[in-house]
Each structure stands twice: as structure tokens, then as C-alpha cells.
Image (cartoon, rainbow, N blue to C red):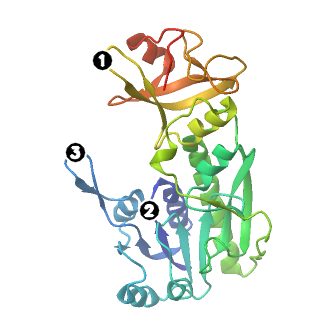
Amino acid sequence: MRIAFLGTPDFALAALRRIVEAGHDVACVYSQPPSPRGRGQVLKLSPVHAFAAEQGLRVRTPVSMRDPAEIDAFEALGLDAAAVVAFGQILPGAVLDAPRLGSFNLHGSLLPRWRGAAPIQRAIMAGDPVTGVEVMRMTEGLDEGPVLASESLRIGPLDTTGTLHDRMAAVGAELLSRTLADIERGVARETPQATDGVIYAKKIRAREARIAWTKPAAEIDRKIRGLSPFPGAWFQLPTDKGPVRVKVLLSAFEEASGEPGEVLDDRLLVATGEGAVRLLRVQREGRGPQDVEAFLRGQPVASGTLLS
């Protein structure tokens, strides 16, 4: 089929690669505009943009797909279908309806649970045992379209957003490729979403990232894993030179008790409002991630230390 692909981050990259491998005619790849990164604020292409350029594919990076000129350019592509994966913009009806067969989105949850911006993070933070990837026909409502295909994935006790993201991206790429083949053959079947169980995955805010040790250990553990690797749940560690911010990238909860925030042993078991959290991987401000054993060799934390 003649396809436009709209996507931006790493999550979308596997899907675009699989579409290219399947032999579709990729008329154009759309991605978010290059953004300034690092101390020098050098413009950096998105992962999808960089891959598309390597493949010699045409790329457009509109600031807004609602721009009438962008809508006209999209309509002029003469598309059979559009595949959308974490593009980062709300698409107007004129864009969604332009392809002959429609526009289709790969979404990282089992709809209608976790519609919206942060489905992987919110699923882990809520303690969901299972999540999944689904392909749906896009409508103007937020993630409200009928579902064409679905595949479930179990969320393990040590899964982070990073590990789950990578598994979902791989599974989702194959699911989208199979679904596009079904659409091309005219055998795809659409199922309306349930009206019960609708939950929105709100965008992650920086103010959510600080750890409140008064919360139950299970809740803190889920927050740590849901916000790993980015933005990273964090606490303040008291040192001789003042408090230092430390991100926690992996943890597990254990049965132990003490004052919330109190370090209970010399291996960073921390008491909470209910139970305790074992910190497994951390990142001190200004430094790279470390397993806790390596971190403690450079920064010992004595039992009885109170974290804030």
C-alpha cells in the first residue's frame, strides 16, 4: 500500500522499520521538528526522522498538522492508509480522512484503559498486572476509535517503563504490520471500544517525581519503576556538603518497618509508611546510573540515615 507514517520517538521506530521491511510504498514520513539538545543546544533529529533520512525517505516536520498548507500537502500524497505511532500531535479530521482506507494508530495499552499521553507509565504506577498494544482506526476523539487488533503483555515485578516500552515496541511493530496486511486484503475486522472502564493516562508532571516516603512501599515501588528511566523518581540524600538529589531507577518492596525515609541497613533498604523499599539502581545528580552496590562504594549510606 501507499502509506504515510507519522511518528517521533524510539517507540515508533520499530514500527516504521517493519513497514519498510514489508515493502509498503512509504510516500512520506512525518515527525516532530528537530529539537535543541545538550549544552550547545544543537538541533537533533527525532529517532524516526533520523532513520527515515538514512533510508532515503521523504520527511516532513510540521509544527502543526492543522496548518491548511500541511493538510493540502497530506491530501496530495494520494495515500491508501496512514500509520500513526506516538507522533505527538492531535490530527484534524481532514488529515485522518484523507487516506483511501483510513488512518490507524498503534497505542500502548488495552483500550479503553489508559487513553492518552502516558499509558505505559500509568499502567505500571497503577499496579496493572497486564497491559498490551492495540491497533485502532483513528477518529477525532482521543484514542476512541474501534480496535482492529490487540496483543497483551504481562507486567513483571521488576518491569520499568524502559523495559516494558522496549517489549511493547517490538510486539507492536509486528502487530501493526500484520494489521496493515489484513487491511490491504480487506479482511480486517473492527470492534468498537467498551464504554465502561475508560481511564485517561495523564501526561507525567515533574512534580510527581519526588518520592514521599510516607506512602506505602508497594505504591512507591510502582512509582519508581513507572518513572524509570525518565524523568526518574527521586529523593534527597543528606551528605557533609548538603543534600544531594538521587534518582531511583529500580526497586523492590520488602516486609520491614521503621520511620518513613529511614535507611534500615547498609544496602539501602528504606522504610516507608507501610513496609520498605529496597533500592536496586540509582543515579546521583550529575552522574550516570549505577547499581546500588557501586553507588554505595563511592557514597556509603549508614543504617539510620533519614532520606527526604
In this rendering, would 251 be left or right of 65?
Answer: right
Q: Amino acid at mark 2?
A: Thr
Q: Amino acid at mark 1?
A: Lys
User: Residue 180 is drawn in which quadrant?
Assistant: bottom right
For the N terminus, the image quarter is bottom right
Image side of residue 248 versus residue 153, left or right: left
> What is the x, y in percent for residue 109?
67, 58
| Residue at image mark 2 | 8
Residue 9 as seen in the image, left or right of residue 262: left
Separation of marks 2 and 3 at Cα, in angstroms: 22 Å
Is disc 3 surrounded by few (<14), some (14 to 19) or many (20+) residues within 10 Å?
A: few
> For the residues carrying marks 3 and 1, which lies nearer the camera in this image?
1
Q: How many marks?
A: 3
Nearer the N terminus, badge 3 or badge 1?
Answer: 3
Q: Position of residue 88 (x, y in %)?
A: 47, 66
The residue labelled by disc 1 is: 241
The label shown at residue 39 is 3
Query: Residue 185: which disc?
Result: none
Q: Amino acid at mark 3?
A: Arg
Q: Residues within 10 Å of mark 2 (few under 14, many from 20)?
A: many
- Say which of marks 2 and 1 sits in front: 1
